[in-house]
Amino acid sequence: MTFKKITDVDLKNKRVLIRDDLNTPLKKGEISSEARIEAALPSIKLALEANAAVMIMSHLGRPTEGEFEEKFSLAPVAKKLSDALGREVPLIRHWIDGVKIKPGQIVLLENTRFHVGEKENDDKLAQKMAALCDVYVNDAFATAHRKEVSTYGVAKYAPVACAGILMSRELEALSQVMKNPKRPLVAIIGGAKVSTKLSLLSSIAQMVDYLIVGGGIANTFLAAAGHPVGKSLYEDDLLDKAEQLATMAETLGVHVPLPTDVVVATSLSSKAEAYIQPVDQVADDEKILDIGPDTCEMFGEIIRKARTILWNGPLGAFEIDQFSKGTEYLARLIAESSAYSVAGGGDTIAAIEKYGLAKDISYISTGGGAFLTYLEGATLPAVAALEARN
């Protein structure tokens, strides 16, 4: 990948338009996680130190294009960004036709998705957006898989287009895992459905030494192997695909260990009674909601000898304490490991935050869809747009 980086560009007194991903989770109108705001700060501070006129833009949620909706306003983000920078960051609602700003100032531009044509990558909107700046900076890795005006189209017309610090770091971290990992390379892929990660599993199986599957994905693999899964979440129509993936991995010499014991309950509830079952004794009315202690130890042995670890997705319903032990056990082993570890995905980050392990993971990706798309080996449109301007 060859593209200009923000550190390669003269920002002094320039009008700098930075596309961040400030799509932060909100609870009752309050930001519940500031991780994406904190991740955006290095590029913002670099531009301010250069006395640039800094314009920040982002989307938030999925509003109806062309309609202002208060619940999708970036107002809470403007307040948190002001607190983080120790200076007021005004929120500009109407900005596409021009922004009055002087060098050394900073503003936050209201939700990009309020503009008709943003998601469809409208060319005229892209030209208007590009006309706002001297330098366009894409620092929103988490949206790099989307071909939208603010992530893709504007890069075509801006006088200068470059990658921000976060974008560069994300791509460097993932490239280290994909192209030159220290081995053994262990991937832990969890989540609800095989269908959402089918391409990822196929791609990952061709590059790792061990592939650990968890959650509903593991249930589908267990069912494909002939084990009873009761009322567990699994995909009956993908049993053949799971079997084919397991066979392909075996042919490649990749070990795909399946759970030998599991934590089950008759309902997914904080009040449910949880108990351990061997995988061949799951009853018809039971749901598999976590891995058992023997499986924890089996997976733990693999993680202890890893030199590179890739983690995406929990191993069970970790939000509920009695079904969180498997995810917590492996998360702590990853944190304690001397291996280079990269973790990504919303649930994965939530688990890391729940157990207070962020400082012990080598790199935590801010991306969800972009993280998976990159690992699948597919092109990220936003990155391609930057490469075209190098």
Image (cartoon, rainbow, N blue to C red):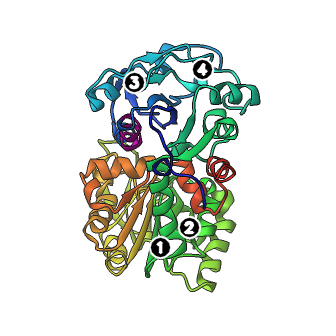
Q: Nearer the viewer, mark 1 or mark 3?
A: 3
Q: Earlier in the sequence, mark 1 or mark 4?
A: 4
The residue segment tinted magenta is 39-48
| Residue name at image x 43 percent, y 26 percent | 103
Q: Amino acid at mark 2?
A: Phe
Distance CA(mark 1)–CA(mark 4): 46 Å
**Is the Cβ of the residue at disc 4 closer than 8 Å to that at disc 2?**
no
Q: Secondary structure at mark 2?
A: helix
Q: Position of residue 375 (x, y in %)?
A: 57, 62
Q: Secondary structure at mark 1?
A: loop
User: Residue at label 4?
Assistant: 114
Which image quarter holds the N terminus? bottom right
Q: Earlier in the sequence, mark 2 or mark 1?
A: 2
Q: Amino acid at mark 4?
A: Phe
Q: What number is the disc on residue 105?
A: 3
Residue 63, compared with residue 36, is above or below; it is above
| Residue name at image x 41 percent, y 19 percent | 75
